[in-house]
Amino acid sequence: MIILGIDPGTATTGFGIIKRNKNRDFCVIDYGCIITEPGVPAGERLQKIHADLTKLISVHKPDLVSVESLYFFKNLKTAMPVSQAKGVILLAAAENKIPVLEITPLQAKMAIVGYGKADKKQMQKMVKILLKLEEKPKDKNKRRDDATDALAIAICGGLKNFAL
C-alpha cells in the first residue's frame, strides 16, 4: 500500500510518500515540500498546491491520502489559509478517487512518539527510526518540520489503516 501524507499550508505544504510492506514495515518513496511564493494571490497559490499534488498523485499512485486535520487554531489569520489549502488537497484526492484519512496532531504524536505533547525533535527522531532513514528528513530547501510532519501523518495513515 502506498500512502501520501500531507501537512497542509498555503506557503508550505509538506508531503511524504511511503509504502507499507506486507510485513507491516514502512519505507520512504519520496518527501518534500510544495512551496508557494509570498505576495502571489491566494487563488494562484492554491492552484499551484493542487497542480503539484496532482502530479505527485499521478506519479506515485497512492492508495490512501492521510492529511493533518486542523482541529483548533490560535490565530484565525493562519487557520483560514490552512483550511483553504486542505480544501484543494481534499479536492485532488476526490478527483483521483483516493480515500482520505484525517489525522490530528495529537493522534500523530501519540502514534509516533507515544506522548501527545511530543516536540518537533522527538517527532523527527522517531520518524527517522520508523522509516530507517540515515538522517532526519528534510527537503531540498532544508525545511524539516513540514516534510517530517507529512511523513508522520503518512505513517499514522498506514497504522490506522491496519485497524480498518
Image (cartoon, helix red, strand yellow):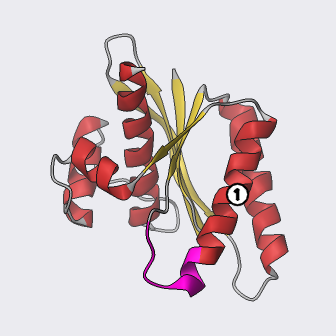
Image: 44 above or below 77 = above
Asked whether residue 162 is drawn in magenta, I would say no
| Res. 144 image quadrant | bottom left
Query: Where is residue 42 drawn, in percent x and y?
Result: 78, 78
Element assignment for label 1: helix
- The residue sitting at 74% across, 56% down in the picture is 88
Residue type indicated by callout 1: Gly
Query: Where is residue 128 drawn, in percent x and y?
Result: 27, 45
Query: Where is residue 122 drawn, in percent x and y?
Result: 19, 58
User: How many callouts does the rendering have?
Assistant: 1
| Res. 43 image quadrant | bottom right
- The residue sitting at 75% across, 34% down in the picture is 58
Please identify the residue farthest to the front as the structure is shown.
72
- The residue sitting at 69% across, 85% down in the picture is 38
- Which residues, given as a range, are shown in magenta? 72-79
Answer few, some or many: residues within 10 Å of disc 1's Cα (few below 14, many 20 plus, some between 14 and 19): some
Q: What residue does disc 1 label?
A: 87
- The residue sitting at 52% across, 68% down in the picture is 141
Please identify the residue farthest to the top as the structure is shown.
22
On screen, residue 99 versus residue 137, left or right, reads right
